[in-house]
Image (cartoon, rainbow, N blue to C red):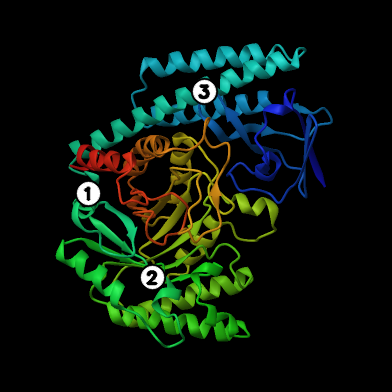
């Protein structure tokens, strides 16, 4: 068994639960199953392999809050590493590598970036040469992290602007990209006008307990109204997910079934009923979601893979023309660090694509800042790098995005995840959600592989997945993030 050790001169600065989010990963970002111990000023991570690896660790960065940072490549050694210094080193290493790749590809790097990088490097040099004074070295390393992330934001912003400008010049504008939000009922009045200004697509939810509250008894009327509203306003329709195995996504009567075969039969009957009713009215089927992770029935990877294949085949059999996609949660695969699994979400997706099921694309669920089951906070540059990894599958990507606007209670949220406590200094608010939209949406739009972006959900005053993530609050009033989406659609897409 391999072991790496790290010292933390100022452990009081760590975010609560930091050990839960720490893991070691290979060069391609795939976590190893790890056992992590955090005691006093020492972090110990054990794993089955002794290969060199990269440490991923949540750090509270000045003016930013919690960020999942990455070290450079570390080998095992008897002497412990200084954790903040290695995270600062990794931040600058990632920044230098990415700027070099983009510059080689033809990007014009502004002088302001090199000035920012130089300042961050100087702070890191002070930290690395001052390790005989551990607490002072940590302060200097934290300054290097902060300055490095500022430089990363500058680089990411410049990249998105240049890419989008080139695509417009080459008449390859991303104006055909699908932009939508998850709806369960048609918006009305001013809300409808805001929706039409921001989006060109409706993501129509198919919450199984609502559609089939009793086995064989369907309630189609709410979904019928939503489909009719989308057609009335010439909006494209993405319907689904048809199958999600979270407990809150399944009807109570399904748990009376004894075995896998019985559950699978009920799943396929439900999917067939939905597809038969709405075929010809839908432009995209979202067939399955989160099947890369355990659901309510704790099925094996093989069983979950089989369910996805059977669900896709059933949709295709009843509607051979409409494109279909499947989506995957936690695309960075953080959960694998705590449970041995053979397939990462990327490998799960690649297996399905190579199986020639006829998938039109794959979805990435980025539920930013939620835990458990969400995505740990990462900077826009790291989001860009992850999208590039997923684009290697060779099919279009659909990004399902959520971000909180409050830490408050949300009785209409179905998913048990909550925003991380240290996500932002001073707590979460609508302005922070707006800032995140303004940072991430241009990155998503700049990626040619990203063909659709779906915000989940549209509003907080109807049942939805994640707490306080809507673009409209519980009173139906728009949050600042919605206006930013409208402006970005107008500015970036026309």
Which residue in the protein does label 2 denote?
206
Mark nearest the camera among 2 and 3 is 2
Which residue was labeled with disc 1? 194
Mark 3 nearby-residue class (10 Å; few <14, some 14–19, many ≥20): many
Answer left or right for 123 relative to 179. Answer: right
Q: Is residue 106 visible?
A: no
Residue 451 percent across, percent down from the top left: 32, 53
Circle 1 residues within 10 Å: few <14, some 14–19, many ≥20: some
Disc ID at residue 148: 3
Instruction: Compare residues 313 and 27 and report the one nearer the observer.
Output: 313
Instruction: Looking at the image, tell me whether mark 1 or mark 2 is earlier in sequence order.
Output: 1
Number of marks present in the image shown: 3
Badge 2: few (under 14), some or many (20 or more) residues near its Cα, within 10 Å? Answer: many
Q: Residue at x 44, y 80 (%)?
A: 213
Q: Residue at x 24, y 33 (%)?
A: 165
Q: Residue 50: percent from the left, percent from the top? A: 77, 43
Taking the image as shown, residue 85 lies to the left or right of residue 212, namely: right
Q: Position of residue 218 (x, y in %)?
A: 37, 83
Q: Earlier in the sequence, mark 1 or mark 3?
A: 3
Q: How much space separates mark 2 and mark 3, taking CA atoms?
A: 43 Å
Q: Quote the CA–CA distance across marks 1 and 2.
A: 23 Å
Residue 112 in the image: above or below residue 366:
above
Q: Is residue 195 left or right of residue 46?
A: left
């Amino acid at each position: 068994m391999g072991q790496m050790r790290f010292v933390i001169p100022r452990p009081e600065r760590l975010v609560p639960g930091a050990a839960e989010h720490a893991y070691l990963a290979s060069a391609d970002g795939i976590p190893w199953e790890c056992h992590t111990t955090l005691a006093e000023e020492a972090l110990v991570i054990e794993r089955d392999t002794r290969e060199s690896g990269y440490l991923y660790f949540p750090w509270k960065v000045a003016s930013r809050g919690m960020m999942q940072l990455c070290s450079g490549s570390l080998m095992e050694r008897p002497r412990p590493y200084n954790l903040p210094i290695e995270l600062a080193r990794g931040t600058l290493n990632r920044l230098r590598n990415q700027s070099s790749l983009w510059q080689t590809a033809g990007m014009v790097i502004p002088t302001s970036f090199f000035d920012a990088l130089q300042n961050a490097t100087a702070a890191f040099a002070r930290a690395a040469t001052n390790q005989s004074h551990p607490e002072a070295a940590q302060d200097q390393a934290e300054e290097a992290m902060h300055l490095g992330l500022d430089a990363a934001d500058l680089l990411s912003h410049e990249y998105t602007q240049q890419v989008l400008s080139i695509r417009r010049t080459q008449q390859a504008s991303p104006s055909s990209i699908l932009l939508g939000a998850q709806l369960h009922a048609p918006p009305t009045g001013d809300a409808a006008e805001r929706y039409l200004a921001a989006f060109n697509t409706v993501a129509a939810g198919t919450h199984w307990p609502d559609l089939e509250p009793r086995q064989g008894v369907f309630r189609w009327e709410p979904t019928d109204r939503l489909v009719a509203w989308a057609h009335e306003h010439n909006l494209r329709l993405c319907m689904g997910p048809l199958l999600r195995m979270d407990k809150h996504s399944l009807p109570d009567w399904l748990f009376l079934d004894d075995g896998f075969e019985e559950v699978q039969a009920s799943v396929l009957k439900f999917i067939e009923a939905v597809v038969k009713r709405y075929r010809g009215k839908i432009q995209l089927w979202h067939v399955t979601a989160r099947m890369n992770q355990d659901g309510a029935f704790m099925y094996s990877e093989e069983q979950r893979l089989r369910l996805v294949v059977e669900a896709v085949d059933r949709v295709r059999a009843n509607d051979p023309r409409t494109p279909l996609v499947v989506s995957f949660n936690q695309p960075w695969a953080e959960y694998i660090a705590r449970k041995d699994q053979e397939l990462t979400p990327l490998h799960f997706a690649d297996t399905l694509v190579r199986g020639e099921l006829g998938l039109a694309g794959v979805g990435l669920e980025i539920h930013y800042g939620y835990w458990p089951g969400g995505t740990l906070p990462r900077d826009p540059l790291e989001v860009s790098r992850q999208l590039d990894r997923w684009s290697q599958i060779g099919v279009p990507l659909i990004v399902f995005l959520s971000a909180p606007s409050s830490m408050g209670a949300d009785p209409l949220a179905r998913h048990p995840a909550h925003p991380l406590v240290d996500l932002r200094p001073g707590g979460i608010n609508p302005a922070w959600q707006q800032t995140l939209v303004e940072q991430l949406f241009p990155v998503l739009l700049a990626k040619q592989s990203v063909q659709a972006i779906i915000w989940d959900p549209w509003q907080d005053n109807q049942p939805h997945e994640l707490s306080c993530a809507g673009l409209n609050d519980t009173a139906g009033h728009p949050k600042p993030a919605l206006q930013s989406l409208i402006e970005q659609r107008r500015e970036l897409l026309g």
